[in-house]
Amino acid sequence: MAKVFNWQLKREMEYFYEGHRPRRQWAIIFDLNKCIACQTCTLACKTTWTSGRGQEYMFWNNVETKPYGSYPLAWDVRILEKLGIQEWKKNEPYYGKTIFEAAPPEERVLHFVPEDEDWMYPNIGEDDCTSSVPPGDHIEMPHDKWFFYLPRTCAHCTYPACLAACPRKAIYKRDEDGIVLIDQSRCKGYGECVRACPYKKSMYNTETRVSEKCIGCFPAVEEGYQPMCVQNCIGKIRIMGFVNPPDKARKDNPIDYLVHEKQVALPYYPQLGTEPNIFYIPPVHADQKYLSQMFGPKVDDAIKRYRTLADDPVTQGLLVLMGSTDRIIHRFDVTGGIAKGFDERGHELVQVPVSEPILERSAFDEKLNVIRHNSP
Amino acid sequence: MKSIFSFLIGISLVGNMAKGQEQISASLVETPLQKAELADQVFEGANEVPISLMAQPMMPPRPATTKTSQIFVKAVHNGEWIAFRLRWRDKEYSEGGPLGKFSDAVALEFPKTNIGDPPPAFMGAKGQPVHIMHWRAQYQADKVVGRKGVRDHYAQGGVDQYHFEYPSFSDAALSQDVRELTDKDGGKQGFWNFLFSGFLFASQDESEFGVFPEKSIEVYQTGRAAGNPQSYRKAQGIDDITAEGFGTSQVLPDPSCLAFGRWQNGEWVVTISRPLSYEGRSKLETSTQAHIAFAVWQGGEGEVGGRKSVTMSWIPLNIQ
């Protein structure tokens, strides 16, 4: 095992290979306060990449209802259970064990193997609340009865468990964008990546007898476009770009800004140790103990900061840029109430007002001589 | 590191012990051996040698414990071909297929060349290739009944349709509406208009109406599009492989070896035969001592890839 630095854990950790950061790292930020689980992302991905024979059960992108939903069944509970109770004190590095450090000597990664049946209920637990809401109940923040939606893609981890586990070295991480791919010509379908990925984002194709996974829509990314799940998000909750480690973070990079500068977007289950590159703006209403298990001990700070964004026009501007263009925004600027996104060469891609003008209409329409109802 | 060294020394000692105790003699017979399934009578005169197996110890991920502790081997040759009868206990038949289910399998390994010391028995090493014959119950099913797919593994599964895979004209499942439409329009055009409902499709080179070229379908089968041998039917029922170390195995085209296995009463009996002189792959000679190694997978126990039971070192193979 080599020693690599994991910035999310703020410490060196063990990994099967020497550390090598790609020149750029693909990343997505999801604002969980806005996701409505419409599954448009799921279908955008499905119709683009996994409509073939042998891919029937495959959802490289899925949206599950937390805490009870999961795909495959109980993926999160089972790896957390395997890892056991680990402690992470706020403002300190994570000194608990990662899945690499907790692996038994004969394994490269601590893992569990999902059963065939575990993949058969892709949206189990949909809309299930933590408890029922009795008549006359009222809700305070954070809610005592709650659920939220968790959209998930491959995290194209900096230290992928799938890559570490593959005995054939058929999985590789691209230097140009950090996207992790399974070489479809070399994979022998041993399923080691399916076992090892703690997020269970490697999947086995029974028809081709090899494993497959989210490819980060690399053909689009190479052309400067965001992945299909991001482009098609009708809630505009996602933005794809490139994340830097904290020491190289750029304030005008949308991803760096939300992850490092404002620290409102957090990686999920960072304690597993793979340094995942999908980040979430945590839901403000859900149980904070649950959220700190999922997003780490600083989740309460992230929520506090998010709730102050009404006084932060720059972050507001960045949030309205999300979903405003299909292209990858490499740099953003918010000046005079206008948010602008720029491509890699500095060309302006899009500009949007931070606040839309508010139009008030009277309840009675004089012209048509009718009362207006609450309809378009 | 210390523990690794002592482990390797241990392996070496056990290996030497194995060399002393275990060796296989291939007796001369006059029977033709160039057949996939060889009757027990062919091996009647051969001694059955129990060969010890252990959990693959070298490269993680590996099994913590072995599932198969012994394989019983008989060997015969006729001067041109050599055949092995392999027998081991396995309480369930496993062919793999569905997610997370793997196939029972056995492999024979030979040094690629007989010059100098043999390569490491664990998959060879860089510049020291090995030649492997890898039989799987799954590959045999490919050969005997055809390649099984999603519809075989999940008979109750329902899918609307796959790209470029549409029912043929004679498909009894076609509704009467479609038949009427196609009849009215004289056939082809109306039928396709019905199916595509105005969609443009780019395939220009279908050789026969209703049958799309494989290339069109392969777009949706990336393993096949990438030319991965795993993604095609194993017509021979066995793979010929070369390797130069862990994780380097490559399937070779056109295997000449033949194999057939039967599982009965909690036991596999597999016969594998190969030419003694296997052009470009490995060469065995009569009246000499060669090297052979074995690996067994119990797919039903999750054994696949490096999760296997193996011989601890090369086993001497005397070809009489």
Image (cartoon, rainbow, N blue to C red):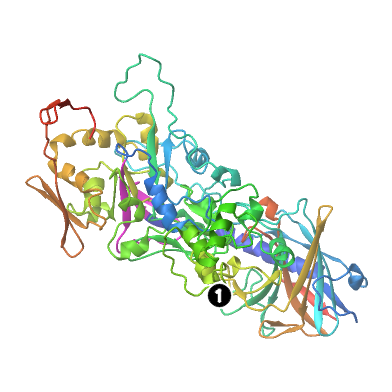
Q: Is residue B31 visible?
A: yes
Which region of the structure is painted magenta? A5-31
In the rendered image, residue A310, in percent from the top left (x then y), is placed at 16, 35
Q: Which residue is drawn at 9% across and 44% down?
A: A337
In the rendered image, residue A104, in percent from the top left (x then y), is placed at 55, 49
- Residue A124 appears left or right of B12: left
Identify the image quadrant of residue A306.
top left
> Circle 1 sits in a helix, a strand or a loop, which is it?
loop
Please, which residue is most extreme toward the top here? A136
Picture quarter with the N terminus of chain B: bottom right
Please, which residue is most extreme toward the left here? A336
In the rendered image, residue B319, in percent from the top left (x then y), is placed at 82, 80
Q: Mark 1 points at which residue?
A: B207
What amino acid type should be assigned to the residue bearing mark 1? Ser
In the rendered image, residue B17, in percent from the top left (x then y), is placed at 76, 66
Q: Can residue B175 be seen in this view?
A: no
Crowdedness near tag 1: few (<14), some (14–19) or many (≥20) residues, C-alpha within 10 Å: few
On whether residue A13 falls in the magenta region, the answer is yes
Picture quarter with the C terminus of chain B: bottom right
Subunit bearing disc 1: B
- Residue B162 appears left or right of A156: right
On whether residue A361 falls in the magenta region, the answer is no
